[in-house]
Amino acid sequence: MQSSKELTNNDTKIVLAETKKGDSFSSLALTHLNDASKEWMLREYNPIDRLLPGSIVLIPKTDYNRAGLYADGFQTIPVISYHRLTKGNAEKLVVSEPVFEAQIRFLRDSGFSPISPAQLINFLNYREQLPQKSILITFNGGWRSIYEIAYPILKKYKMKATLFIDTDFIGGKKAMSWEQLKKMADNGFAIGSLTKTHRDLTKMKKGESFDAYFNIIKEELTRSRDQILEKTGYPCSYMAYPYGKTNAFVSSLVQKLGFKGAFTLSRGSVPFYTDPYKINRSMVYGSFSLDQFRKNLAVFKRTDLK
Amino acid sequence: MVKSSCLRFSLHLFIILGCIGVYHQASADVRQEENYLLLQTRATDLERKGELNRALEHLMMSRYFSSDNALVDEKINVLKEKIHDAAEKQFKAGMTYLAENKTANARRAFLSALFYNPGHRQALNQLKSLTIPPRFKHYTVKKGDTPNTIAAHFYHDETWKDAILFFNNLAPGAALPEGMTLNIPIAGREIIQKKSQEDVLLSKARALFKKGDNRAALEAADKVLSLDPSNRGAGELTAAIYLKMANQQIEEKQYAEAKDLVDKVPRGFKNRKKTVARLDAALQDAEIEAMLEDAWTAFNAGDYEKTIHILKKVQSISPENKEAINLFNTATFEYAKKLYNEEKDLSALAVIENADKKYKGVESLTQKIEARINARAQEHYRKGVKYFLNENLEQAIFHWEATLSLNPDHAKAGENIVKARRLLNKIEKIE
């Protein structure tokens, strides 16, 4: 290993390593980046398939492609959303257990890396490079089936997800308890707000004055956020718009209240230049075949950037 | 004896260690060279794929293994310049596309600029502003303004005052200092309940436009824009009115007026391109019409040369114009006939060759001209023979040359000229 060979280009620091017997991308990532899970940085940077002793490997010590831009196109991040799961028959918004497991197994076997909303927002703010096959898995609503069915499957396949919850629903008959949510949060699942009562934030009710509407939607956001912090011990920095609906005013309010990002339910993967307060999410329906599921997982948009 | 064998052993050891040292040095040199070539090859592959920054980094790293840094440095500098130029070229292209309202092209160009130069902040900012819509308008506080008056002005509803204070980090009841810039959140119609004066006027303008009263619609839309210059609906309506008026002017052949109206419509506005194309086509038709008129005037005055000249211009713009084709054939025929009558046969032939052979009379006139040219050529030939027999070689050559000028394919005239010149040379030598 010759760590003295290094260079800097566009703020990217790169060092050169010569591999020894037994070296892998993971061991090199651990040695040089102090994080074995960053092996994808080395794998994606170096145009080689496998390491042999004495191979020359260039190790980017910093992000080298924050936007995921390549000569033939750019990276996009699929964000998928589930609603509820069942051990019985699937419905439009209810995915059956075996189908869910098949989808998660497919993601694992296809080399997808689950990311957190914080990583996604950093990517959108041009602050963090993500693996070429990244995915953000989310759930809408704090349904009990998420804890009982999805959570064990996700753990089995070493996948993480983000739950958006309408806090008034938690503790109800079909909902998760705060204890269950905290357990998931303690195990690396992110918890975001789906407001307090799941009210459509874009609509004023008949006869409602603007100031009443304004105070209510402010409360919908702040009270759910505060309760998530209070009950789980983790700050809530992300939210999903109820029914996926927003407008310029609601997005401004969400931003002003300090949320770092917000999600809609519009279909389509997300490039780095996306508005962080209008992030697409593709809803997975109970009727989806594996092929239909795959169509929502685009990780690259082909376009000539040369 | 012991001393001598120790000395011998030391000498052998010295030689062996020396050899190992040389071997290691040679092997290290080979590895240096291999690494250099490997990194250079990877750099070349990456450059071929268009991944210029990664190619550059591989080149820069290969420098550590190079025995000739000057060569590597030159390659590095060339690539750095290529990357820099590509980034700037793409950024400029992006700005041009932006000015032309071609947002998809602009986005691709800014992405490309950022691909070449990941630190290109301007390209990054342009990309973001293309995707993220503005969420605020800005307003400078004037004397006498209060949160209520500002709320009434922007939302026609004083109860918006708390929202204005909230978005500007102001406490309820806070005074608004004159000159302070406020962020005024942009709100959709679904949460603005009262209709503004602008909305009422705009509805009226739209109704007038629908009825076909363009002038009155334009006046009403102008009023909206005087109240709110950023009113998108009024802006779009104004553009639509100008476009409709421009099309009417085109129909009335008032092209200058039509052009003035189209110029008022922003580039990229729906159907603007179509109207511009229509106006261009109409202007071209008008130009052709004027040229045809000039051509007819020249033709009627018997100036066929001028007629043909004008019609050639028409045909270069509109090769399929039937009137131009017909008049061209007529003028060419008449001009050739005139030249034939003046016995300018060669000129007549050159002219008639431009006419359509199928045009009435063209073929027979061509035959007549060619027959007379051939007859004259033959006459000169015979005169040449006569002079030759009379031993007047200069005159013979003169007539045979005249034969060839009329009929370049006349083989005998050519042969005879050679013979006559040869005889002339011999005579000159004898004399």
Image (tube, rainbow, N blue to C red):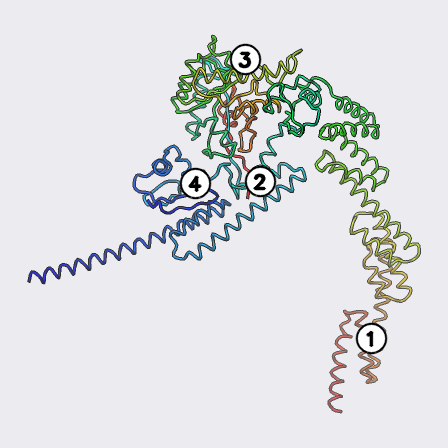
Q: Looking at this view, is B226 or B280 the one in front?
A: B226
Mark 4: give few (<14), some (14-19) or many (20+) Cα within 10 Å.
Answer: some
The image shows residue B241 at horizontal and vertical percentages of 79, 31
Instruction: Return the mark for residue A197.
Output: 3
Q: Name the residue under label 2.
A: B122
Mark 1: give few (<14), some (14-19) or many (20+) Cα within 10 Å.
Answer: many
Image point (62%, 39%), residue name: B105
Residue B381, compared with residue B126, is above or below; it is below
Q: Which chain carries label 3?
A: A
Mark 3 is on which residue type?
Answer: Thr
Q: Which chain carries label 2?
A: B
Q: Between label 1 and label 2, give the one nearer the viewer.
A: 2
Q: Name the residue under label 1.
A: B381
The image shows residue B158 at horizontal and vertical percentages of 68, 18
Q: Distance between the residues labelled 2 and 3?
A: 42 Å
Q: How far apart are marks 1 and 3 (CA)?
A: 114 Å
Q: Name the residue under label 4.
A: A45
Q: Between label 4 and label 1, give the one nearer the viewer.
A: 4
Q: Looking at this view, is A93 or A79 the one in front?
A: A79
